[in-house]
Image (spheres, grey):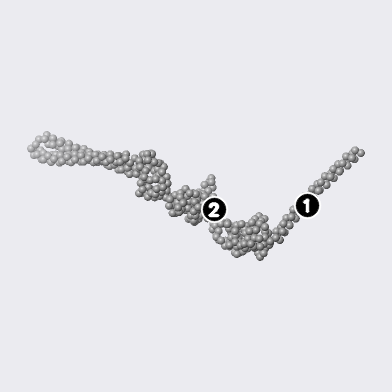
Amino acid sequence: MRRRTKRFLVMQLVCAMCVVVAGGCASRQGAEEAKSSAAAARKTAVKKETVRVGVALVRTRNFEERVNVQGDISAKNYANVTARIPGTITGMYVNEGDMVTAGKTKLFEVDSIKLNDAVEISKQDYAVAEQGVNVAEAGLDQVNAQLRKAEADLKRLTNLYEKEVVTKDTLEKIQTGYDQLVAGKKQAESGVALAKERRKQAEVALRISRKNLSDATIHAPISGRVSHRFSEIGEMAAPGMPVIRIENTRLLEASAFLPAEYFAQITTGGTKVHLAASGIDLGLRPVSYKSPTINPKLRTFEVKAIINNPPAGVAPGAMVDFSAVIARRTGMGVPSDCIQTRGGKDVLFVADGGRTAMKIVKKGIESEGYVEISGSDLNEGDRVITEGQNFLEDGSPIMIGGEAK
């Protein structure tokens, strides 16, 4: 009896669980059917409800594919001016912002007083050397005169000796005196040569001291504007240490780094870039430089464009909006917000009478709020939906409320 009772209770419990599960499944199935019915009803309602829309005309437009980056503006020509000789800066003749002219404007001086004194000393040394040459040449003239007299005496006594008028001892004394004068002439000639070499040495020293004095005064190597003074009067200067920086502010250069994927599409002199700096439109300018290599770490390459006679407000150091025109072509275009994605495809809606026609399109270049389209049977002048398209399906009834120009 107890076994039957237990078996009966288990059977009741199993039946109850089956009823619960069946009820749950029925509830889920009913919810899904209700949801599907509601969606179908909404879709039907959308199709039946007239939607007020805005339209625009399909037109042929010029499209440009651009790469937009930011870059910098710098002077195309500049010079970091250094001293030619080491020394103390004794004169500074320009200030930051001053305009300078190549070869004319004096910039600064280094140890000019000391170098002036060196020139004066070199002049005196040269004068002494010049007098040394004069003395040596006068001595040589004196020896030459004595030698001529001795030569004449030697000829005369030789004739007398041959006639046995004078003794051999007398002739030998005259011969010895003559030989000594010949040796003296060689010595005097050497003295003249030595004096001339000393004069030449003094002349070189004078030329060097004058060159140093000339190098002490630095003039502008290029025309432009002084952008920075690195040193002041009283500070030390030396070759290789910039004292003044000059930049030609009338010839600037915009530079930027583009992604490596566009390397093959950029050509020097062919590709145009649109520049804008400090809110000033600088227009389209050709690429003047393209780096021959790609940075292997950053995967970018440098591109530059020249800015001749920039307008006021554009100066070295400014940031520039750098827009490289990669491609340019003409095609049919529509406002970018016309395009929607339905079922993984790009589509737009065209006003066809009082209803819509959904067109699958292929997007091309997008610029200035318009997108190039292709791959459909659209024609120029067709009206595409620009407002209300989110509520449309193919064949939806519409009422046009406004048409864009």
As drawn, which residue projects farthest toward the right?
1
| Dot 2 crowding, Cα within 10 Å, few <14, some 14–19, many 20+ | some
Amino acid type assigned to the residue bearing label 2 in the image:
Val
Left/right of residue 191 with respect to residue 228 in the rendered view: left
Of the 4 image quadrants, the one containing the C terminus is bottom right
Mark 2 or 1, nearer chain start: 1
Q: Which type of secondary structure does the marked residue at label 2 adopt? A: strand
Q: Quadrant of residue 187?
A: top left
Q: Residue 349 location in percent, x, y?
A: 64, 60
Q: Residues within 10 Å of mark 1 (few under 14, many from 20)?
A: few
Residue 343 falls in which quadrant of the image? bottom right
Screen quadrant of the N terminus: top right
Point 17% across, 36% down: residue: 180
**340 sits to left or right of 96:** right
User: Dot 1 lies on which element?
Assistant: helix
The residue wearing badge 2 is: 67
Name above or below for residue 264 compared with residue 230. Answer: below
What numbered label is drawn on residue 41? none
Residue at coordinates 90% horizontally, 40% vertically from top-left? 4
Please tell me which residue lies in front, 2 or 56.
Answer: 56
Q: Tell me if I can see residue 4 in this picture.
A: yes
Q: Residue at x 36, y 45 (%)?
A: 93
* Quadrant position of residue 242: top left
**Left or right of 146, for residue 368:** right
Task: Identify the amino acid type marked 1.
Answer: Gly
**Horizontal and vertical percent position of residue 18:** 83, 46
**Residue carrying label 1:** 30
Across and down, in percent, residue 83 comes to 37, 42
Q: Is residue 246 visible?
A: no
